[in-house]
Image (cartoon, helix red, strand yellow):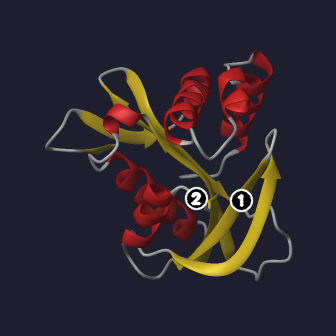
Amino acid sequence: MTTNPNELWAVRPSTPDDAEAIESVRIATWKACYRGIVPDAYLDALSVQSSRVDRIRKGIDRADAGGSVVAVAESQVIGMGFAGPPEDDQLPGGTGEVFAVYVLPDWQGRGVGRALLERLTSGLRALGYHSAILWTLRDRRATRRFYEANGWELDGAKDSLDLQGAVHLVRYARNLGESS
């Protein structure tokens, strides 16, 4: 477990018992941070659903070492992250993917996200990946600044999602031989 000496939180591997808390963090973060980018109707409809919690639980069971982490303050999950083999089979060999890094709004700006991202990239490195990618919302400037400050660079790839309206994505890449 990685602890932060300045605050009472730590990063540890997630367990299947964390699945509901992980989903709650994702939803709370989306609702607070994506307002104005993702349509309000979509955000307002988000709720913890047992089927999604079950998928998260199964994903944690299948995750490689370092592929699923949570940040915990006291006994509360305050942040989470997932990484592993890329979903895009067209990427060069040796490329992993960071799928998610979410931190509850009250805990943002305190190093929690950085610690989660470092843990995920070191986990990918330990699995033999030498580079990684991640996707983020094009219009979420704070998130983009966070990734850029941690050594990630736009690689030119773009995509979009239909979440009751088009939401644009950009892709970042990073050499995992470099520490952040």
Residue sitting at x 39%, y 35%: 105
Q: Position of residue 72 (x, y in %)?
A: 37, 31
From the viewer's perspective, is residue 141 above or below residue 71?
below
**Is residue 130 something one can see in this rendering?**
no
Q: Amino acid at mark 2?
A: Asp
The one nearer the camera, 61 or 41, is 41
Identify the residue shown where x is 58% and y is 58%.
139
For the C terminus, the image quarter is bottom left
Classed neighbour count for the residue bearing mark 1: other residues with Cα under 10 Å, few (<14), some (14–19), many (≥20): some
Q: Can residue 40 be seen here?
A: yes
Along the viewing direction, whichever of 87 and 136 lies nearer the viewer? 136
Cα separation between marks 1 and 2: 7 Å
Residue at position x 75%, y 81% in the image:
93
Residue designated by label 2: 139
| 128 is higher (above) or lower (below) than 73 | below
Vertical order, 96 against 65 (above or below): below
Q: Quadrant of residue 6?
A: top left
Marks 2 and 1: in contact by CB < 8 Å? Answer: yes
Image quadrant holding the N terminus, namely: top left
Q: Which residue is mark 1?
A: 168
Amino acid on which the number 1 mark rests in the picture: His
- Percent of width and height locating residue 165: 80, 45
Q: Which of the pair 14/39 is nearer the observer?
A: 39
Element marked by disc 1 = strand
Picture quadrant where residue 117 is located: bottom left
Quarter of the figure with residue 146: bottom left
The crowding category of the residue bearing disc 2, from other C-alpha atoms within 10 Å (few below 14, some 14 to 19, many at least 20), is some
Image: 82 above or below 16: below
Q: Is residue 43 left or right of residue 107?
A: right
